Amino acid sequence: MTTYTIDNSHSDIGFNVRHMVFAKVRGHFTQWTAELAFDPTDPTKSSVEASIDVGSIDTREEKRDGHLKSPDFFDVAKFPKMTFKGKKVESAGSKKYKLTGDLTIRDVTRPVVLDVEELGRGKDPWGNERVAFAAKTAIERSDFGLKWNQALETGGVLVGEKVEIEIDVEAVVKA
């Protein structure tokens, strides 16, 4: 088992959610940490834990980011961190896995399953061992207490219920 830390300059936690029923708003979190214990000979023995600074949300619109940080959504003053703790890794094909874990947002913890793909492993030009993964999942935001919305005159609501999450990780062997 090898322990890795995330190279944040080559990694991203992104999301998208429907806006006004027909469009999408994309964003990501700029401040987060994670530790990965990866066993390339038996990936099902691997584990991961992550902590995300919710106040680092960035949707490229300052006013919207402020609203997302407010009690209407994440309530960053009360709940500054979002966490993920992996519980189980299952093989889902060649270099593909199902990672089941507990996601906690606003002190509400729910199980989620991420579809994970190992993208590759190798040494960088400085001799550091690296590994890369991509992961996807979707959650219902109301399951975590994120219920604010606004009805539209034309029908539907301003903010979609389903949040699609995409994670790209490059990790380096921990010193």
Image: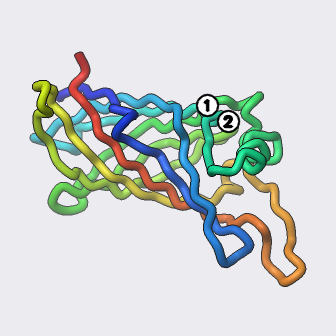
Which residue bears the numbered disc 1? 81
In the rendered structure, the answer to whether residue 22 lies left or right of residue 28 reads right
Vertical relation: 161 (above or below) 91: below
Q: Residues within 10 Å of mark 1 (few under 14, many from 20)?
A: many
Amino acid carrying label 2: it is Asp
Where residue 40 sits: x, y (%)? Answer: 14, 40
* Colour logic: rainbow
71 or 101, nearer to the observer? 71
Where residue 120 sits: x, y (%)? Answer: 17, 48
For the point 81% across and 56% down, which residue is it? 148
Give the number of the disc on residue 107.
2
- Is label 1 or label 2 in front? 1
Amino acid carrying label 1: it is Lys
Where residue 26 sits: x, y (%)? Answer: 58, 58
In the rendered structure, the answer to whether residue 58 lies left or right of residue 172 reads right
For the point 29% across and 39% down, which residue is it? 170
N-term mark: 1 or 2 = 1
Q: Say if mark 1 contacts mark 2, CB within 8 Å.
A: no
- Check disc 1 and report its element: helix, strand or loop: strand
- Look at the image and tell me in which quarter the C terminus lies: top left
98 or 79, nearer to the observer? 79
Q: Residues within 10 Å of mark 2 (few under 14, many from 20)?
A: some
30 or 36, nearer to the observer? 30
For the point 31% across and 32% down, which residue is it? 36
* Farthest right residue in view: 153
21 or 87, nearer to the observer? 21
